[in-house]
Image (cartoon, grey):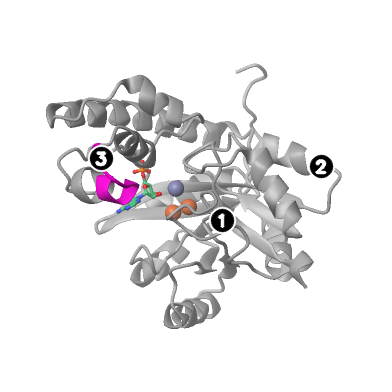
Amino acid sequence: MPGSFADLHIHSTASDGLLTPSEVVGLALAQGLSAIALTDHDTLAGVVEAQAAARGTQLDVIAGVEISSEGSWGDLHFLGFYVDADNAFLAERLRAMQEGRLSRARQMVQRLSRLGMPLQWEEVETLAAGQSVGRPHIARALRNRGYVSSVQEAFDRYIDHGGPAYVPRPRLTPDEVIAAIHRAGGVAVLAHPAHSNAIRYVPDFASCGLQGLEVYYPTHSPEDQHSLLDLCQRYNLLVTGGSDFHGPGHAEGAELGAVCVPPDCVLRLKQIANQSTGRDTRRTPEGS
Ligand code: AMP
Ligand code: ZN
Ligand code: FE
Ligand code: FE
């Protein structure tokens, strides 16, 4: 029954998604989903709007975030579910990440200019309507100017790791990310472990307090799912899954609701979040 499924990995215009949080909620309602987690990159900015849009409906909107980290082999992403958006510790970590993203994006625009592809900073800023400016916004600006024919080409030629316009940004280590999610009362889950080539590090992350694995993900093969389910059993980790929806027809991730988990996954996440012991009750001061 379609109404009982949850998509636990979704982006909006608060980061690099194409739909506003309210539009995401409208689509989830139209599909009859029972729950979604909004998991924008390094920001919780879309959550309040999404929860307001879903108020009074059957849709449960889980406060989520996808926090970037890095292993020696490249990008690593952690999902935080049921995080307290007002938690001062997490808010400060995310604020610092936004600052890092901003100065890094400006440096990348300068490099592109030196490579003969001048962009106005405002073009990138307008595309990044939310707080979390990222390489996808720069890629879209390059495509809009006709310097490349697709976002993928922008990554492949210029802004992927090792590309001539790539600039790294400061990132938290995996244990810092997991700790920040815990401090905000959230459940820490490793996003797309097979896609990130991170399966072999799961035991280390589990010993740092990782609580779940995103087993179901658009690019995970049945074999990947099998080995991840096995790891979940061995290390007592929760199973989650989601589409990584970035917008209709967007190349990254899948369509909203295309990868879902049954409601007992959501129930278990909620139970673990409620049991969370390390919860830090300090809030962001009013008006800050
Ligand atoms: P950033 O967080 O600004 O470094 O950008 C990372 C985001 O860029 C990822 O979450 C993906 O959405 C996208 N991305 C990363 N690598 C690629 C790639 N090779 N091709 C297309 N998109 C990518
Ligand atoms: Zn993204
Ligand atoms: Fe990701
Ligand atoms: Fe994602």
For the residue labelled by badge 2, is the local secondary structure a helix, a strand or a loop? loop
Q: Position of residue 132 (x, y in %)?
A: 46, 34
For the residue labelled by badge 3, is the local secondary structure a helix, a strand or a loop? loop
Q: CA distance from mark 1 to mark 2?
A: 20 Å
Please tell me which residue is depicted at 36% across the width and 38% down the height of the picture: 140
Instruction: Give the residue pinned by disc 3.
Output: 168
Q: Quarter of the image containing the C terminus? A: top right
Instruction: Give the residue pinned by disc 2.
Output: 55
Q: Earlier in the sequence, mark 1 or mark 3?
A: 1
Query: Is residue 174 placed above or below 214 in the rendered structure?
Result: above
Q: On the rendered structure, is 233 left or right of 93?
A: right
Are discs 1 and 2 less than 8 Å apart at CB?
Answer: no
Q: Is mark 1 within 8 Å of ligand 4?
A: yes
Q: On the rendered structure, is 8 left or right of 18?
A: right
Q: Which mark is residue 9?
A: 1
Q: Quadrant of residue 19?
A: top right
Q: Is residue 149 highlighted in magenta?
A: yes
Query: Is residue 102 placed above or below 255 in the rendered structure?
Result: above
Q: Is residue 277 something that shows in the picture?
A: no
Q: Amino acid at mark 1?
A: His
Q: Which mark is residue 34?
A: none
| Residues packed near mark 2 inside 10 Å, few (<14), some (14 to 19) or many (20 plus) | few
Q: CA distance from mark 3 to mark 2?
A: 39 Å
Please tell me which residue is depicted at 44% across the width and 31% down the height of the picture: 127
Task: Compare residues 20 and 217 and report the one nearer the observer.
Answer: 20
Q: Position of residue 157 (x, y in %)?
A: 19, 47
Q: Quadrant of residue 32?
A: bottom right
Please tell me which residue is depicted at 45% across the width and 59% down the height of the picture: 208
Q: CA distance from mark 1 to mark 3?
A: 24 Å
Q: Is mark 3 within 8 Å of ligand 1?
A: no
Q: Which residues are magenta?
A: 147-154
